[in-house]
Amino acid sequence: MLGMVPSSYYRRPGSGKKGNKPSEFTFNESKGYVSQDVVIESVKSILSNEFIDCGYRLMSCYLKREGYLINHKKLYRIMKEEGLLKLENRINRSGSGRKFVKYRKVNTTKPFECLEMDIKMVWIPNVGKNAYLLSIIDVHTRRILKDFFSFNIKQDKV
């Protein structure tokens, strides 16, 4: 053929998926390189705790605390293969156009200048009812100064 390089008409497309094959080992600071099954067992042990119900991004932070050197994308693939992702419970963040608090950020210059209170409802399955967690937070340091956990919180506790 005139004007065409031979590679254009001799080329045969390869079979299979494009890109590198996913790695089967993950580095741990204390154990060295461990297989994917060890990572799955660590994920399942973290998820077996009573109040931990998280996705792959927060799970990657938990695994990094345990000494794993793992990327959130790799953890997403592993959790998806094992069926550990909670895809049906995702929050819709499409931007509904609602107007939230306009000046949410409080600027402080020193600790104890501004304190905030936060109340969370926590479901206790053994008792079968909600409990409340009242936390007093220092805005400057973002530390919890005091917390109070009870089944009912009255005005005098606040």
Image: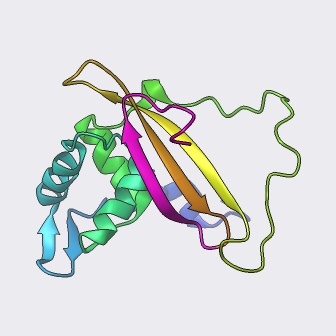
Residue at 42 percent across and 28 percent down: it is 152
Residue 87, magenta (yes or no): no
Measuring from the top left, give residue 31's x and y in whole percent: 11, 78
Q: Quadrant of residue 48?
A: top left
Q: Which residues are magenta?
A: 141-158
Rendered position, 75 above or below 89 = below
Residue 155, magenta (yes or no): yes
For the residue pair 142 and 39, the one nearer the viewer reads as 142
Measuring from the top left, give residue 56's x and y in whole percent: 40, 49
Q: Quadrant of residue 88?
A: top left
For the residue pair 89 and 129, the one nearer the viewer reads as 129
Measuring from the top left, give residue 26's x and y in whole percent: 23, 69
Residue at 49 percent across and 57 percent down: it is 11
Measuring from the top left, give residue 129's x and y in whole percent: 32, 20
Rendered position, 4 above or below 46 = below
Residue at 80 percent across and 52 percent down: it is 104
Would residue 125 appear left or right of 33 to someone viewing this image? right
